Image (cartoon, rainbow, N blue to C red):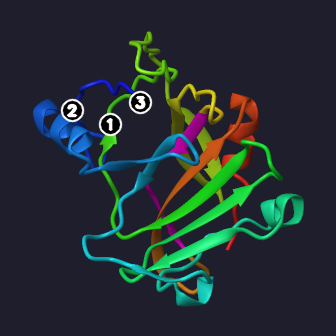
Amino acid sequence: MRLAVQGASADGGGDMSALRFLSLVVAGGIFAFSPTAGARAPRKSPGAVEIGTDVSAVKMPVLRSAYFEKQWGKPDVVAYSDGSYRMRFRQGTTLNYFFIYGCTSAQPVPKTPPEWSADGAGEAMPSHKQEWQMAKILGKAVKWYQADGGSGADFPSYQTVDFSMTAPDGRVGIYRIIASSTSKKSAGDWIARVNW
């Protein structure tokens, strides 16, 4: 997968050097590859271990999706000792996936979305520039983009930037959503289908 090198900052202002952004991305300081979804999943904190498969073990407010529970069934949940979690929905045996990640910290937002390319099975593939897409998540505008073009083993994936949300009890959490779908339109619709 190829990522564009560009300046980034936590607020999207671009005051981080391009070299530092490159080292974070390439060295894995920002993203880890998730083979089941074809997108980059947040890294858990160093030393964090799986502590359960139920949201009761999660320390942060849990963002979930009643829509996907009704349509696709109960999610697979992994809770980590650092308080983060991963919630994964899958549509039957298809390659349609929907992930909600509860993160311990937000990663920098690039000025422009990364370029993406399809998996070329080791061959160099053309990259594609893109514009930010926007979704309304519980009333908040959140940027998202196409993360990759998929491969023979997974559908293209689309993901949000890391974003914060305040739960009804006043606690704040940081989240990332990844949708794996053959349709950009479907992915954009899915990203907004979360709730407390």
Q: Is residue 194 visible?
A: yes
Name the residue rendered at 71%, 59% in the picture. Answer: 89
| Residue 155 to residue 35: above or below | above
Give, as a three-letter code, the residue at label 3.
Answer: Pro
Please tell me which residue lies in front, 172 or 82.
Answer: 82
Q: Is residue 132 above or below residue 66?
A: above
> Which is more N-terminal, label 2 or label 3?
2
Residue 113 shows which numbered tag? 3
92 or 11, which is in the foreground? Answer: 92
The answer to which of marks 1 and 2 sits earlier in the sequence is 2
Percent position of residue 42, x then y: 40, 57
Mark 2, Cα crowd under 10 Å, few <14 / some 14-19 / many 20+, is many
Mark 2: secondary structure: loop
* Residue kind at label 1, given as amino acid type: Pro
Q: Which residues are magenta?
A: 157-166
Q: Position of residue 162 (x, y in %)?
A: 43, 54
- Asked if residue 143 can be seen in this view, the reply is no
Which residue is labeled 1 in the image? 110
